[in-house]
Image (tube, rainbow, N blue to C red):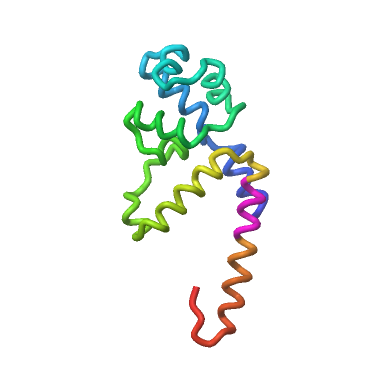
Amino acid sequence: MKEGLTTELYENSNIESTGRRIRRLRRNAGMTQRQLSRCLGISVSYLGAVERDVRPLSRSLAEQLSRHFQLSYDYLITGRHPLPPALLFPDAQRQELSHRLLVLIATCSPEELMAVYQMCSHYLTARRDKAQFRPGARC
């Protein structure tokens, strides 16, 4: 991955962090941290740390928040409204694995995300190159 793409994705973009998105949703709902933390059964300090992106967002809390604000889990994590999962991932196993990957990368720093991308890219490139030389092999 080129350095320019990293810069474009993280430094020169308007990508909102998950914590900032949660803070914006809470404020737009007219709620204080205390009110939302009571609804969710978590401490005010934990919610504040999540909103500041100091603490990672747990899967269970993300699910609670998506239900509370009546938003998709994907929107809460990525800030994007995705295509319906059935269109992207036709079978349940692919859909579950995709969901797990989103949860995993949602808590990554830009450096960790870059490392994950590079590892995946190298692995898939090597696997696909190797598959090209096997008769009847498919990816």
Viewer-proximal residue among 116 and 46:
46
In percent of width and height, residue 22 lies at 46, 26
Residue drawn 46% across the image and 52% down it: 98
Magenta includes 116?
A: yes
- Which residues lie in the magenta part? 113-120
Residue 55 sits in quarter? top right
Viewer-proximal residue among 99 and 81:
99
Where is the N terminus found, in terms of image quarters? Answer: bottom right
Residue 74 sits in quarter? top left
Tell me: 102 left or right of 2.
Answer: left
In percent of width and height, residue 42 lies at 48, 20
* Above or below, 135 relative to 97: below
Residue drawn 62% across the image and 51% down it: 116
Magenta includes 49?
A: no
Tell me: 56 left or right of 67.
Answer: right
Q: Which residue lies furthest to the front in this view?
A: 41
Residue drawn 53% across the image and 32% down it: 57
Task: Decide whether the magenta segment is chiefly helix, strand or loop.
Answer: helix
* Above or below, 48 relative to 103: above
Residue drawn 47% across the image and 37% down it: 77
In percent of width and height, residue 131 lies at 56, 78
